[in-house]
Amino acid sequence: MAIDLSYAPGVTALVEKTEAFIREVVLPIEDEHGGDITAAGGDTLRVELQKAAKDAGVFAPHAPVEYGGHGLNMTDRAPVFEAAGYSLFGPTALNIGAPDEGNVHMLAHIASPEQKERFLAPLAHGDMRSAFAMTEPSPGAGSDPSALTTRAEKVPGGWKINGHKYFITGADGAGFFIIFARTSGVPGDRGGATMFLTPADADGLRVGRHIDTLDRAMIGGHCEVFFDDLFVPDSGVLGEVDQGFAYAQVRLGPARMTHVMRWLGAARRGHDVAVAHVAQRDGFGGKLGDLGMVQKMVADNEIDIAASRALLTRACWELDQGGHASNSTSIAKTYASEAIFRIVDRSIQMCGGLGVSGDLPLARLSREVRPFRVYDGPSEVHRWAIAKRVVGAAKKAAREAGA
């Protein structure tokens, strides 16, 4: 069987245009503001950058064509998203940052025609932002979503939602929320969740404090959100009642992979900065790049970049074939999240004092990529899930062999 790892000319052209746009328009703004998107202007900057991305023809590569995007599948998104991720502000500029990118993907697959016009269209066009409200403070849903405590009770004409969400990315300034709430069962049950769509200005919805975190490049922060008798009409149910856990898989696997794409771009920038430095920096009778210990770090970075891309490509192929790709996305996410941090960390080491200073982007890249080992499932949870599947398959095979 022949394996073709090349991209169509249209995808290659889009990658090249994205690289030029990031280099010429976005990187200077990121550097000016040290990668802090709030300090750089928040939503005002987002609107300006997204207009520039539209003018450059690189906006919304993932969104359906009928909503103004390029309609790329998961495999073709990878090099474009990586090119955008070369700047911490790049995903915002192209409208492919979290959580909006994942919400566009999920709404395109699950939402009703009316919901698409009301929520997906303005989100894809960049006219508003969104938030995905699933995570809760302890003892509620986190890495274990079955611990979901936010509850939606049926009332005439719709549902009333009560609960407390935590670490909701992009909540401050979002135009609408996708809310994960329990509609049957009790915390710990593997079913009984439903997703709801609601405008952010609905009575009973309140965005609380920003949680102070390492990263500074995700617009709208990571916030607490409170629901106090929030009424959502029946038309706000996303998909079917009690099927939220199943629908979440439509979003979570692809979203893990797009995180890999974006932050791989950031890691590659760090590597490029470090290699340029050691190729020119004199020390110990020659260039730093000629020293064996430095060469090992350069080589290890190249290996981690190549391996992350290979695992990403496999997972995206499985997703494009229509599978859940649960194992492949867990493997790619776990490896890449750790490899990306290693790449940036080695890059800092190669640059010495400059690496930990604000004179290079490496320190802020480290600040941004470190949380990826936690976001979208900690490495430990993914390792547990991978092992559980493998051991479970072995037990099943033993049972069948003994039957």
Image: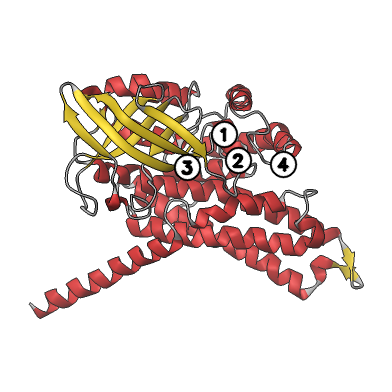
Q: Would you name the residue on which mark 3 appears?
A: 76
Q: Nearer the viewer, mark 3 or mark 1?
A: 1
Q: Earlier in the sequence, mark 2 or mark 1?
A: 1
Q: Quadrant of the N terminus?
A: bottom left
Q: Earlier in the sequence, mark 1 or mark 4?
A: 4
Q: Secondary structure at mark 4?
A: loop
Q: Residue at coordinates 28% horizontally, 19% vertically from top-left?
A: 114
Q: Would you name the residue on which mark 1 appears?
A: 92
Q: Residue at coordinates 15% horizontally, 22% vertically from top-left?
A: 156
Q: Amino acid at mark 2?
A: Ala
Q: Amino acid at mark 1?
A: Thr
Q: Are marks 2 and 4 in contact (CB under 8 Å)?
A: no
Q: Would you name the residue on which mark 4 appears?
A: 34
Q: Secondary structure at mark 1?
A: helix
Q: Position of residue 144 (x, y in %)?
A: 33, 55
Q: Is residue 118 visible?
A: yes
> Which of 266 and 149 lies nearest the eye of the viewer?
149
Q: Earlier in the sequence, mark 4 or mark 3?
A: 4
Query: Farthest residue in the left direction?
Result: 403
Query: Farthest residue in the front direction?
Result: 228
Q: Would you name the residue on which mark 2 appears?
A: 217
Q: CA distance from mark 1 to mark 4?
A: 15 Å
